[in-house]
Image (tube, rainbow, N blue to C red):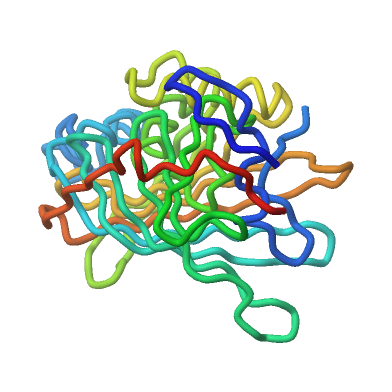
Amino acid sequence: MTVRRPGRGGAGFAGVVVAGVTAAGVLVTGCGSGGSGGAGGSDGHPADPGRVVAGAVEGLVAARSSKASTSMEMASGGTRVTIRGEGVYDFTHRTGRLKVVLPKDAAGAEEHLPITELLAPGELYMKNRGAGVPADKWVRVDTASLPDGNLVTGGVTDPMVAAELLRGAGGVTYVGEEDLAGVRVRHYRGTADIRRAASAAGPHARDSLAAAAKGFGSQKAAVPFDAYFDAQGLLRKLRQQFSYVNQGRTVAVASTTLLYGFGVPAAVRLPADRDIYAGKIES
């Protein structure tokens, strides 16, 4: 497979990360077909559920940064695998740095080295991408060129794009209060429409979500979610469930993002052009 380096609006990378996030025969690519006043009202009762969820992005931007833990569980037939990530995210500049750990092979041996991923508006950078890429080089992907807008392809759902997806939320209900790692949170549940979210998203996420809306197709554009907010209206946990068809099989993906340690240093330096790999990646 030859890797090309498109600009921010380019295309042609739909399969570039297949090898990096392929485990036990499941391909995580190729889809087939807050800031609004906190999570509670002035009387101590939960605010309007739809308003709380819609304010997720503004709340995160106000918090500036956080630590992030992610997991992506994929199920197809009787096979289930999980990809995990750990790092930091800068909500002001919409950039993040995560170390992504791929699952072990069936024999229990380590199959892949951890992949370092840098997330930026419209772009995904990966180091330790796979065979054929020099150890000191990065692979760059234009996320708007991916059939799913990189909601699942990279093994991590960009935390800010995940929050932007909540702008398309509908039928939101308040479930109740829970404890989450020692923090009291309010749990909301609903379904987000990718197409509606793309129309309402900020410019940094609009193209990626528009690509996802087209790639998933109308039947798969509804994304059930569970969102957890603290008393300040900060999104602490978000679980989103995606579904698409790959090679005739339905693949169910549950993406979970945990946000904590708000305000931590999270500066992300993107690779220089000379550090971007433009050669051939072995499958």
The answer to which image quadrant residue 218 occupies is top right
Closer to the camera in the image, 4 or 53: 4
Horizontal arrangement in the rendering, residue 5 relative to residue 233 (left or right): right
Residue drawn at point x = 54 percent, y = 53 percent? 155
Horizontal arrangement in the rendering, residue 213 relative to residue 22 (left or right): left
- From what the image shows, is residue 165 above or below residue 27? above
Closer to the camera in the image, 191 or 221: 221
Residue drawn at point x = 63 percent, y = 26 percent? 12
Q: Position of residue 16 (x, y in %)?
A: 62, 41
The answer to which image quadrant residue 146 occupies is top right
Q: Position of residue 145 (x, y in %)?
A: 57, 26
Residue drawn at point x = 59 percent, y = 66 percent? 82
- From what the image shows, is residue 236 above or below residue 179? above
Closer to the camera in the image, 104 or 142: 142
Residue drawn at point x = 11 percent, y = 55 percent? 265
Q: Residue furthest top?
A: 199
Closer to the camera in the image, 215 or 230: 215
Q: Position of residue 272 (x, y in %)?
A: 29, 39
Q: Position of residue 231 (x, y in %)?
A: 17, 50
Number of numbered discs present? 0
Point out the image quarter for the N terminus. Answer: top right
Q: Residue furthest bottom?
A: 108
